[in-house]
Image (cartoon, rainbow, N blue to C red):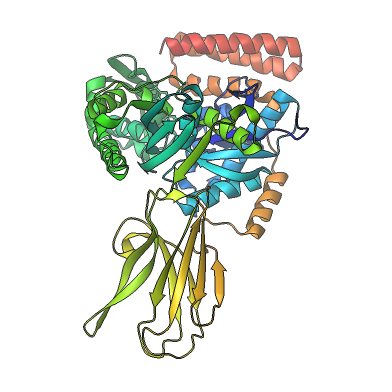
Amino acid sequence: MSSRPPIFGIDLGTTFSLISVLQDGVPVVLPNALGEGLTASAVSVMEDGRVLVGAPARARATTHPERTALAFKRDMGTDRVYDLGGHRFTAPELSALVLQALKHDAEAALGMAIEEAVVTVPAYFDEAQRQATRAAAQIAGLRVDRIINEPTAAALAYGLHERHRELTAVVLDLGGGTFDVTVLELIEGVIEIQSSAGDSRLGGEDFVDLLADRVAARIETSHGGDVRRHPQAWARVREACEQAKRRLSSVETTTVALVELPIGAATADLEIAFTRAEAEEAWAGLLERIRTAVTRALADARRRPEQIDEVLLVGGATRMPCITRLAAQIFGRLPLRHLPPDEAVALGAAVQAALKEGQASLDDMVVTDVAPMTLGVESATAMGSRVVSGLFTPILDRGTVIPVSRVKRFYTMSDGQRMIDVRVFQGEHSLCKDNRLLGRYEISDLPPAPAGAEAVDIRFTYDLNGILEVETTLVSTGRQHAFVVQQTPGRLTPEQIAKAREKMAALKVHPRELLPNTTALARAEALHLELVGAAREELAHAMALFRGALEQENPDLIDACRARLTALLGVLRRGD
Ligand code: AMP
């Protein structure tokens, strides 16, 4: 046994995050301060400046939308700044708070320090988004040497069960904010990723948005006001639609009920019924985007749907019957769901963490991965006397097995050319303007030479984490330069990370051990907004008793009142 703490697996999700570890050869999800495996990826700043992370923060999205951030994973790799009641955070900082909460809770559950983790990202995350994820871990004080793609992690968790079968499988991962589709082969415990495709801006949240848009349209027709103008009202509509979407996974008809919803200067009580068929009609465009990504991943892997032995569904949003149906239509078979869809990625991350540690129980497991997007440089070509520039020349094609290192040679275009501008892009379009600029570097002071006589070798090295290193060598002199991507939006320098760490250390984080109390109150407040009449009064009474117990600081009374309040929340929610 090693005395070093184990490496943990973290699924940093759009809606929920999880931390896991391999215990006795089996990956397990560790409970948070609420005793739950799923920690809401939500941050809210309380009126006294304390920062809440997890379920109570998520509950405050309806009561305090201007102080609460959700789904910030979608802004990883961008410069967006969230202002939560005067406290400003970037997406990596918000993610760092979630990572810190996971780390803290798991440390409390296990009684040991957590130093290192393997963190998962959508396969379709680009360079900037991966760098931002790394930065988040650094800000949270976690060492993250290894980032793995979510479907790869799911396949690893799955592979653990199917170690002795040979098969080609597809992983469809529809989370809160992203969609990934991956084709992989599993042979005697070796998992080989054949292709990955996806859409980093398509997830369960978009299904909610489309329902919420319909609700807004109906409100506009019936009451003549734009509910989006009122942040709290809009947050309540979205939350009611989130719940309706989930109910529609098991029932055919549901009602979005909103009482005393502010619309313009007045309020209204609303009941809007949805059938599953209506919802699916609203989602037709999203389902089509999913189909397109699946088709692309199959084409990249040179597989026909009938050559796929198993279809594995991952991510909470694959619980929607329309997703199962779509998968069945495309592949001609019902998908498998051996593992809890919310946990598969985290479980696989724990397997990867154990592989990194070299745990003996996993000796016969190996995983390979592929580059999800094409990487290349800008080039120009001469057409007669004209020079056409802005062309994208790939160096690493998407689907290349990683880690990989490839080199391509480029020549000067004019006599006496003194400078070469190396501009690195990521994407699938033939013109650079349609792809994403990752970084640039100027090779200057070229020795004077006729056009085409001087050349530069550009080497791309793509590591297992999906992080790119670029190296240029001037052929005539052997002068080399390795450069890091600098223009990526949202990329943090070591100084910025150090600063962010200081900022996090100075924050007053709400004590995690008080989380059950805060969560019960936050959930009660959110539900209170939705109720009327006797139910509202009953809830207000239970909340008052609980607040009284908290003021008295009487632990037994606090526990009893919280249990009563939590039970009542369950009853009232069911009656919704
Ligand atoms: P994940 O990021 O994998 O945790 O996925 C969370 C997403 O799954 C969110 O968009 C949830 O709304 C969605 N989800 C969870 N449970 C259900 C359900 N029963 N029906 C539909 N969507 C669900």
Quarter of the view holding residue 391: bottom left
* Quadrant of the image containing the N terminus: top right
Q: Is residue 509 left or right of residue 234?
A: right
- Of 138 and 116, the residue lying toward us: 116
Q: Is residue 138 above or below residue 540?
A: below
Q: Is residue 21 above or below residue 531?
A: below
The image shows a total of numbered marks equal to 0
| Viewer can see residue 461 | yes
Position of residue 291 measured from the top left corner of the image (x, y, whole percent): 26, 36
- Of 324 and 135, the residue lying toward us: 324
- Of 283 and 123, the residue lying toward us: 123
- Of 364 and 180, the residue lying toward us: 364
Residue drawn where x is 35% and y is 72% of the image: 379
| Viewer can see residue 90 | no
Q: Is residue 32 left or right of residue 365?
A: right
Quarter of the view holding residue 321: top left
* Quadrant of the image containing the C terminus: top left
Q: Is residue 353 left or right of residue 383?
A: right
Position of residue 38 measured from the top left corner of the image (x, y, whole percent): 55, 25
Position of residue 60 measured from the top left corner of the image (x, y, whole percent): 53, 30
Residue farthest to the right, as pictured: 3
Position of residue 211 measured from the top left corner of the image (x, y, whole percent): 30, 30
Q: Is residue 430 above or below residue 6?
A: below
Quarter of the view holding residue 492: bottom right
Image quadrant of ligand 1 equals: top left
